[in-house]
Amino acid sequence: MIKILLVDDDVEYLNLEKLFLEREDERFEISVACTVEEALDYIDNDEIDIVVSDYMMPNMDGLDFLKILRLEKSNDIPFIMLTGKGREEVAMASLNLGADRYIQKSGDARSQFGVLAQSISQEMEHVEAKRNVRDINTLLKSIRRVNQLMVKETDFNKIINGVCEILLETQGYLDVVIALVDENNEIIRPMAGTGEHDKRRWFITPDGKGDAPRCIKDAIGSRKTTIIGYQERYCNDCKYFQAGSVHQTVIMPIFSKDKIVGILFACKSTGHDINDSELELLDEVAGDIGFIMEKFKAEKLLKEKEKKFRTLINKSSEVIMLIDENLDIYFISDSIKSVLDRDPKDILDQSAIDLIEELVHKEDVEGFTEALKECIQDEKHVLRMEVRYMHNDGTWHWIEAEGRNRLSDPVVKGVVINFRDITYHKLSEENVRKMNQFLTALNKYSLEVTTVPVSYDIFTIISHKLRELIGAKVLILSIFDEDTFDLVVRHITLSEENNEKITDLLGRRAEDLRIKVTPEMYENLTYEIVGDIGTAQDATFCGMSEPIDACIRKLFRMQWSIGIALMHEGTLIGVILIYGDEDTKKPDSEELKAFASVTSNAIHRWMTEKKLIKSKR
């Protein structure tokens, strides 16, 4: 149901308005008030979804009402202002105060109320969309906290209990349980949980046998996420379903190396349905739990990637601009301050074309100008565009503009352009794209290097793949020799032009070189990325009696270098050196740490298997 409050001192009009809206949409549940005071009491004491208010009323008018809501009570309830014909200045004032729409009280009542019903539905859809954005954004922040917990905490029990607590704090969650397989991989049982449900002890084997609830068995058997919706009764002993509660529960298998190792059980409170975006994010949590769990079991705790959470759209105040037939700006709302960070006085009375050429990105100027001219010439044409503009702080922002021709209106006599800042939405899309690219690359790299047979040279494979992924010009992989305890360069890989250069100098490719260096040059390396690689004086390269770092920089004209330690169980097993020139983008530190963690474990696995085979021989 949509709870609507109609406010109008004209009782006859108010009753007609109520009658029509109730007939128009069965979802509408309508309350009425004849004064602003009465309306404020309704809002304070009842759950109202949207307000439709007349402007002309005794004692306090619609603008007074709006001021109280927005300025005194900081209430952002959707607000539609009804104004009489010829009251466009009131409409503009109401929009400046934070009204969502205005509708004129003129013409045929059926048509007028039809527009009002449509506007109410559209505003409520917008409110629902913002609520979904807010809920997803809240979950993103929670998942970021989960990732931070997984990276920093070294106690696995604290991690899984912390995950439950963080998710429970997220808006809309009623209960969270994590069940995991035991150390012998024999049974899955609840290991952590928090919330309002009675915590029942149960167990289930990875092949689906045990005394677990049927919903858990369904998820294990199908290997897919199971969602209990509303009145479905999976379990007779679930007090929430016995009571007929209206809520949903997601039962999500936790995988590790394609094997089910646990269950994430999350119950939503009434009124908070699980959507596709939320399932994707919960799937990320389940995947992280499986990943961290496997690493703890094998005592290979990795620093998990820090997830870049998406900032979804946070709609700012809409800007209203009026342009006359000569394309001169004769009105602009004060909200221009919050969007463009500019004073309206600096924009008024200048040409819209000049303003576009001054502020809009050169690639968007022509399209925006042509669309505006077409809107001037054709009353039926609606201008809709997304363009980049120069913010007052010198950065490029995105705006969404919509324009309509109202030149024939005797009061407006111009083109009305509404625009809003959508920069956060654009940036979030780009962040999501980059994050997905990184996760895909990391997963592919992990699969490739953790399955290298001992008969292959893993160092060559790792060096080539890492340099391509990172985009470096030169990459040097050094590993401690277990017999001599020297740090030996096992592989050097370069971009094609640099490989040709070293071939000309030495008569062979860089990948054929095996150069011994001493550990002292890496003595300051830790888990963290360091910029200063070292200055061991006895390290030589290409016949140069200089440190290897200086040699690489000089020979290939590199501008920067990064060193990252390869650690296994707290012990330094090797070092990766990465070089780039002025045109090479430095890799993201968190992404580089993730690649290094995967690399360390892949090398340790490969060397262990090779040593085992050697010992058997």
Image (tube, grey):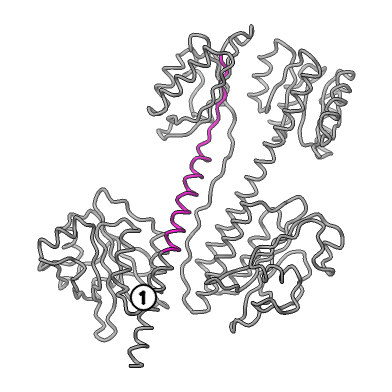
Q: Which residue is mark 1?
A: 603
Q: Is residue 427 magenta?
A: yes
> Looking at this view, is 371 or 69 the one in front?
371
Q: Position of residue 509 (x, y in %)?
A: 17, 65
Give the residue at x 37% y 78%: 606
> Looking at this view, is 500 or 64 the one in front?
500
Q: Which residues are magenta?
A: 415-444
Counting other residues with Cα less than 10 Å from the Cα at mark 1, is it few (<14), some (14-19), or many (20 or more)? many
- Lateral position of residue 555 relative to residue 141, left or right: left
Q: Is residue 132 above or below residue 592?
A: above
Quarter containing the C terminus:
bottom left
On the image, which quarter does residue 322 sit in?
top right
Residue furthest toward the top?
Answer: 410
Q: Position of residue 200 (x, y in %)?
A: 77, 74
Q: Which type of secondary structure does the marked residue at label 1 adopt?
A: helix
- Lateral position of residue 188 relative to residue 586, left or right: right
Q: Is residue 406 above or below residue 240?
A: above
Q: Is residue 176 magenta?
A: no
Predominant secondary structure in magenta?
helix
- Lateral position of residue 216 relative to residue 300, left or right: right
Residue furthest toward the front?
Answer: 222
* Residue type at the position of mark 1: Ile
